[in-house]
């Protein structure tokens, strides 16, 4: 019995001594470990802010900064080092960016990437010394439009975040969010869901029209002004009131294509309005074009373009209905900034547009679709005369 008690006391004593030694070791080594960790972290931070002196991690409200921001360090002299995660050609593009106190970029590096070319690894050097207004002027990564855009946007997000963290104000909303906010302000009953109206009638002084998906009305855009018109209502603005009256009275009728000979084989459908304008859907062979007509790309999918044209051959509106072009390159044909260039064009002027950078086949296929629309117009008019 005595031996058992003695063994227990001995064991307890050994454990106590070990605990004291461990605590003492931790007391001595913890500051060293922390110092080494801080040194390693500072090394990474110094890569994008070489003249930085001391960095302190900043806790922030994610709602107040751009959504790409994941981590922030403040430098002793007022600069910031910001880590951002975004999506280029693939997701998981992680960028660390240093912003000096004067708002210029001190450096940028790619920490992680799933991109295909790998050129984003050294792209950060392009931004050193740049301010926000100069970011988009940097050279594009060859063959990587989407990666370039994502990288540039991340740098601008870092600059905007540094302004906000420094007590300044900046609008961090995306273009889509700004548009939606303006539409909601003009027509609150729209409840946040709107569709850009394809216009088939000639109206003047209106840049765009959006209809509420829930049927509560429309919003007319003139420059930076948004005018809401509830269903059954009108507007105090003369241009809006006139345009709304025209569009509200517009009707369309399907055209039986089998009644015509000589139509382009890439004409998908045709309609005519009561005022005599035509709405045509045509196909164009984009990436994979062969002999201006046939599509040989593995997807086998054409660009589908909707065009409204007056009887005398002037384009009213254009819309990319469908496309399966290369992501980050040819898919720019689905952006209004591209297809909107055709509005107001004629058969003599429709080729006077800015091509999609790095997507010659897509651009040519789109032009072929517009050419087919004009060819179809001539046949349809001849049949109606």
Image (cartoon, rainbow, N blue to C red):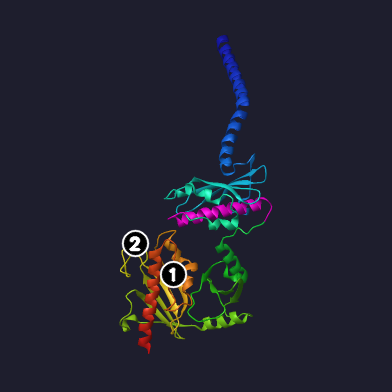
* Circle 1 residue: 320
Q: Quadrant of residue 314?
A: bottom left
Residue stretch in magenta: 141-168
Element type at marker 2?
loop
In magenta segment, residue 180:
no
User: Residue at the location (57% across, 16% down)?
Assistant: 11
Residue 103 percent across, percent down from the top left: 63, 52
Q: Can residue 91 be seen in this view?
A: yes
Distance between mark 2 and mark 1 Cα atoms: 18 Å
Mark with earlier residue (2, 1): 2
Tag count in the figure? 2
Q: In which quarter of the image is residue 33?
A: top right
Residue 377 percent across, percent down from the top left: 39, 81
In magenta segment, residue 159:
yes
* Circle 2 residue: 299
* 101 to 261, vertically: above or below: above
Residue 293 is left or right of residue 343, and the answer is left
Residue 195 percent across, percent down from the top left: 51, 70
* 312 to 328, vertically: above or below: below
């Amino acid at each position: 019995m005595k031996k058992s008690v003695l063994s227990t006391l001995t064991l307890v004593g050994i454990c106590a001594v070990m605990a004291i030694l461990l605590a003492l070791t931790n007391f001595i080594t913890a500051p060293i470990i922390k110092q080494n960790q801080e040194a390693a972290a500072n090394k990474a931070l110094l890569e994008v802010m070489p003249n930085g002196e001391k960095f302190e991690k900043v806790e922030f409200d994610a709602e107040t900064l751009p959504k790409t921001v994941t981590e922030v360090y403040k430098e002793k002299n007022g600069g910031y080092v910001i880590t951002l995660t975004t999506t280029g050609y693939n997701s998981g593009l992680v960028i660390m960016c240093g912003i000096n106190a004067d708002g210029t970029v001190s450096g940028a590096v790619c920490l992680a990437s799933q991109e295909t070319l790998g050129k984003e690894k050294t792209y950060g050097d392009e931004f050193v010394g740049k301010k926000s207004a100069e970011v988009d002027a940097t050279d594009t990564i060859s063959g990587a439009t989407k990666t370039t855009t994502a990288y540039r946007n991340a740098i601008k997000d870092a600059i905007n975040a540094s302004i906000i963290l420094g007590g300044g104000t900046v609008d961090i909303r995306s273009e889509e969010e700004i548009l939606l906010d303006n539409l909601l302000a003009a027509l609150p009953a729209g409840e946040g869901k709107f569709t850009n109206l394809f216009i088939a009638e000639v109206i003047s002084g209106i840049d765009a029209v959006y209809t509420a998906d829930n049927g509560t009305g429309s919003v007319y855009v003139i420059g930076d002004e948004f005018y809401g018109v509830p269903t059954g209502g009108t507007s105090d603005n003369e241009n809006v009131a006139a345009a709304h009256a025209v569009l509200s009275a517009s009707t369309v009728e399907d055209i039986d294509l089998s009644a015509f000979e000589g139509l382009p084989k890439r004409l998908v459908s045709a309609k005519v309005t009561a005022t005599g304008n035509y709405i045509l859907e045509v196909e164009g062979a984009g990436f994979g074009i062969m002999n201006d007509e046939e599509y040989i790309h593995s997807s086998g999918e054409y660009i589908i373009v909707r065009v409204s044209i007056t009887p005398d051959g002037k384009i009213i509106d254009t819309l990319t209905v469908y496309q399966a072009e290369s992501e980050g390159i040819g898919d720019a044909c689905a952006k209004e900034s591209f297809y909107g260039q055709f509005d107001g064009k004629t058969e003599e002027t429709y080729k006077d547009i800015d091509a999609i950078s790095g997507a010659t086949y897509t651009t040519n296929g789109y032009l072929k679709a517009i050419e087919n629309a004009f060819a179809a117009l001539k046949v349809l008019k001849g049949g109606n005369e």
